[in-house]
Amino acid sequence: MYSKELVKGTLKTIILKLLSDSDKMYGYEITQKVKELTGGKIQLTEGALYPTLHAMEAQGILTTDVVNVGNRIRKYYTVTSAGKKIARDKVSEFSDFMDTMIFLLDLKPKMG
């Protein structure tokens, strides 16, 4: 598992990319998808995820749709058009950052 510091710095990018690639997702679904895609290396906590989702909703990056599922209310998040552009920009910025860190730290790509 990666440190909380690394995940915190990339959380918004992770969320935006996942939501941009899907129609809509709810919070727990996001945590499980990230865990599944990373083989458990990244495990998002509710304490990190929900404040970020709420902040992005307040910024107009995400919209929500509340659905009753049995006795529970499930809040689905969807990326707005502006959010999709931000997602592309954040992924591009992160890719460039990774290239810079690989160069700066003189890292060799892992094979296989």
Image: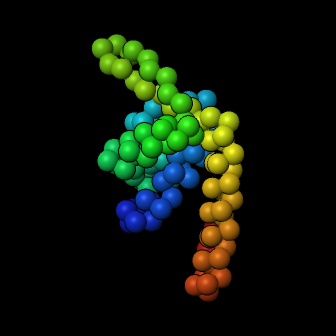
**The C terminus: image quadrant:** bottom right
Instruction: Give the image location of residue 29, x and y in percent.
Output: 45, 35
Question: Residue at image x 32%, y 19%?
Answer: 72
Q: Quadrant of residue 90?
A: bottom right
Instruction: Give the image location of residue 9, x and y in percent.
Output: 48, 62
Instruction: Give the image location of residue 96, x and y in percent.
Output: 68, 68
Camera-side residue of 40 and 87: 87
Question: Residue at image x 58%, y 84%?
Answer: 105
* Colour scheme of the picture: rainbow
Camera-side residue of 55 and 24: 55
* Residue 112 drawn above or below residue 37: below
Question: Residue at image x 38%, y 45%?
Answer: 51
* Residue 13 drawn above or below residue 33: below
Q: Quadrant of residue 100?
A: bottom right
Tell me if 91 is positioned left or right of 77 in this view.
right
* Residue 108 drawn above or below residue 11: below
**The N terminus: image quadrant:** bottom left
Tell me if 70 is positioned left or right of 13 in this view.
left
